[in-house]
């Protein structure tokens, strides 16, 4: 259920049993390019491993990760100060604009702009100007 033949090659080399269908059984690894069916999750044993976890998109997608980290920062500011301030645009444009305008004009900051749905660095750029947004 994956386009990557290397998964089967490594599993064979390690003598692991791969799962190829939603019928849970005697397997070690269930590797798929899609979401795991809840029926498989319910029947899993402690030693079995999967490559997709329910809800993983909440940290795998950069927009949702940023939103979740900012929520944690609001609740635990000392523990979650290890990443840059983050805004979801255009939804939080007014908040970002307010922050941007509050900075002294001579002290220009650089902002990282990342598109919501691209991957592998596509569409990312740096800016110091609101007009670029």
Image (cartoon, rainbow, N blue to C red):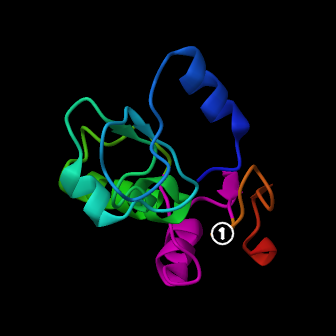
Q: Which residues are magenta?
A: 85-114
Q: Is residue 108 visible?
A: no
Q: Residues within 10 Å of mark 1 (few under 14, many from 20)?
A: few
Q: Position of residue 22 (x, y in %)?
A: 39, 59
The quarter of the picture where the C terminus appears is: bottom right
The reply, left or right, for residue 26 in relation to residue 85 is: left
Residue nearer the viewer, 54 or 73:
54
Q: Position of residue 24 (x, y in %)?
A: 31, 51
Q: Position of residue 126 (x, y in %)?
A: 77, 54
Verify whether residue 34 appears in magenta.
no
In the rendered image of this protein, does residue 10 appear above or below residue 28? Answer: above
The reply, left or right, for residue 108 in relation to residue 70 is: right
**Residue drawn at (27%, 63%), measured in percent from left and top?**
39
Verify whether residue 105 appears in magenta.
yes
Q: Based on the displayed image, in which of its 4 quarters is residue 127 positioned?
A: bottom right
Report the residue marked by disc 1: 117
Q: Based on the displayed image, in which of its 4 quarters is residue 58 positioned?
A: bottom left
**Residue drawn at (24%, 39%), measured in percent from left and top?**
78
Residue nearer the viewer, 108 or 121:
121
Residue nearer the viewer, 2 or 117:
2
Q: Position of residue 105 (x, y in %)?
A: 68, 61
The reply, left or right, for residue 48 in relation to residue 87 is: left
Q: Say what secondary structure mark 1 lies in.
A: loop
Residue nearer the viewer, 91 or 54:
54
In the rendered image of this protein, does residue 21 appear above or below residue 17? Answer: below
**Residue drawn at (68%, 54%), measured in percent from left and top?**
112
**Residue drawn at (36%, 36%), measured in percent from left and top?**
27
Q: Is residue 51 visible?
A: yes
């Amino acid at each position: 259920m994956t386009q990557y033949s290397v998964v089967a090659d490594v599993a064979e080399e390690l003598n692991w049993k791969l799962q190829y269908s939603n019928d849970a059984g005697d397997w070690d690894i269930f590797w798929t390019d899609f979401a795991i069916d809840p029926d498989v999750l319910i029947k899993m044993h402690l030693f079995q491993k999967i490559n997709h976890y329910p809800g993983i998109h909440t940290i795998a997608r950069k927009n949702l990760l940023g939103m979740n980290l900012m929520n944690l920062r609001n609740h635990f500011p000392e523990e979650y100060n290890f990443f840059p301030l983050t805004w979801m645009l255009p939804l939080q444009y007014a908040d970002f604009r307010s922050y941007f305008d509050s900075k002294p004009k001579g002290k220009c900051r650089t902002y990282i702009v990342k598109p919501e749905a691209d991957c592998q660095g596509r569409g990312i750029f740096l800016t110091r100007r609101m007009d670029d947004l």
